[in-house]
Amino acid sequence: MPSFDTPVPVGAFALLFFAFAVKQLAADFLLQSAWMAHGKDRASAWILPLCAHTGLHGLGTLLIVLPVKPALWWLALVDFAVHTVIDRGKGLIGQRTHFPPTDTRFWWLIGIDQFLHHVTHIGLAAILAVG
């Protein structure tokens, strides 16, 4: 495999990405209430449950960023915004398609959602790990 010259220290990046993966697990599965999970996908009155849920993501990111690079606190707002767009998009697609959990496409949708979140976290970890 060819070597890549990168200003991102691998150890710091790996540790930060691990922290973001734990944050994702906590915010999407351990701390998300039924009110958030069902409410964010509704056709109406969805904004409060969605923002409560994506607020968990933003708070988790803030807790990761502050000890590493406090000046980059605003990355928590970026994460909040990105999670809001991804989760609302998944909700809108779910409303239009009505895939039941027995349909493979239901799981594809969840998988794409999680993939996009992890790609976001790769970027955030790289930003934090540089210099």
Image (cartoon, rainbow, N blue to C red):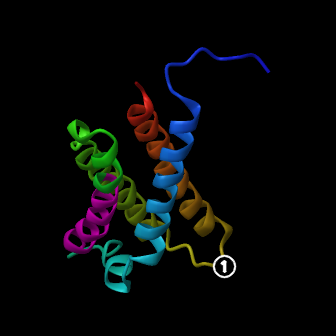
The question of residue 50 being in magenta is answered with yes
Give the quadrant of the N terminus: top right
Instruction: Read off the residue under disc 1.
Output: 102
The question of residue 40 being in magenta is answered with no
> Quick one: which residue is furthest to the bottom in this view?
34
> In front: 49, or 60?
60
Tell me if 121 is positioned left or right of 81 in this view.
right
Q: Residue at x 25, y 38 (%)?
A: 72
Q: Residue at x 39, y 54 (%)?
A: 86
Q: What type is the residue that disc 1 sits on?
A: Thr
Count of all numbered marks drawn on residues in the image:
1
> In front: 74, or 49?
74
Relative to 96, residue 73 above or below: above
The region drawn magenta spans: 46-61
Residue 42, quarter of picture: bottom left
Q: Secondary structure at mark 1?
A: loop
Judged by its main secondary structure, the magenta piece is: helix
Tell me if 105 is positioned left or right of 87 in this view.
right
- Mark 1 residue crowding within 10 angstroms, few (<14) / some (14–19) / many (20+): few
Q: Residue at x 46, y 77 (%)?
A: 30
Relative to 111, residue 14 above or below: above
Q: In the rendering, at what x and y percent does residue 93 appear?
A: 44, 62
Give the quadrant of the C terminus: top left
Tell me if 48 is positioned left or right of 111 in this view.
left
> In front: 34, or 23?
23
Q: Residue at x 36, y 72 (%)?
A: 41
Relative to 111, residue 95 above or below: below
Q: In the rendering, at what x and y percent does residue 99 appear?
A: 55, 73
> In front: 5, or 51?
5
Q: In the rendering, at what x and y percent does residue 110 appear?
A: 55, 64
Q: In the rendering, at what x and y percent does residue 4 appear?
A: 64, 17
